[in-house]
Image: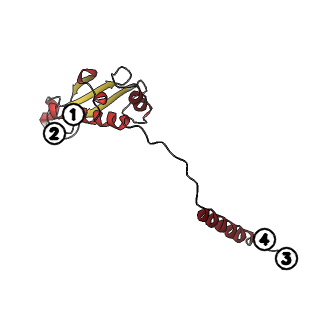
Amino acid sequence: MNSACTVRPDEVEWTAVRAQGAGGQNVNKVSNAVHLRFDVRASSLPDDVRQRLLACRDQRISDDGVVVIKAQTHRSLERNRADAMARLQALVDAAATPPRERRATKPTLASVQRRLQRKSLHARLKAARGKVSPEG
């Protein structure tokens, strides 16, 4: 993992909220879920990683360039914080690897010939479907 693409904890804003779902009385009393907010534009990530992250079509990234992650799977606040941070780091790691450059390829001569054979066969089949003349 590249150290330049590690998310710094001081750039992350945390908010403790109450979790949803089952959990008995504990879920009503304790704020164990975590909202993580990470401003991509104001971060110290390298420019290319930042641009790829902003261009990413992920529903967790708002139009303002803020990543919002809610973690509520665990019962403890610390584990939810660690889970949210791991998910953010995975998102940044995915953006840190540049996409592979596509190389145009040429179809083989045999595949071109097969395609043309199928095409002419299909054309003859369709031509045979023409209207029947009354002369017969």
Residue at the disc numbered 3: 134
Give the residue displayed 12% in from the left and 34% down from the top. 26
Task: Give the secondary structure at mark 2.
Answer: loop
Q: Which corner quadrant of the image does residue 53 belong to? A: top left
Determine the secondary structure under disc 3. Answer: loop
Q: Which picture quadrant has residue 91?
A: top left
Give the distance between the C-alpha atoms of the residues marked 1 and 3, in whole angstroms: 77 Å
Q: Residues within 10 Å of mark 1 (few under 14, many from 20)?
A: many
Image quarter (top left, top right, bottom left or bottom right) of the C terminus: bottom right
Spatial CA span between label 4 and label 3: 9 Å
CA gap, disc 4 and disc 2:
71 Å
Marks 2 and 3, Cα distance to the nearest angstrom?
79 Å
The reply to whether discs 2 and 1 touch (Cβ–Cβ < 8 Å) is: yes
Foreground of the two, 117 or 70: 117
Residue 76, percent from left and from top: 14, 34
The residue singled out by tag 1 in the image is 19
Q: Within 10 angstroms of label 3, few (less than 14), some, or many (20 or more) residues?
A: few
Query: What residue sits right under mark 2 in the picture?
Result: 23
Which disc number belongs to residue 10? Answer: none
For label 2, the crowd category at 10 Å Cα-Cα, with few meaning under 14, some 14 to 19 and many 20 or more, is: few
Which residue lies under the disc numbered 4?
131
Q: Are marks 4 and 1 in contact (CB under 8 Å)?
A: no
Residue 124, x across and y down, in percent? 72, 70
Q: Amino acid at mark 1?
A: Ala
Q: Amino acid at mark 4?
A: Lys
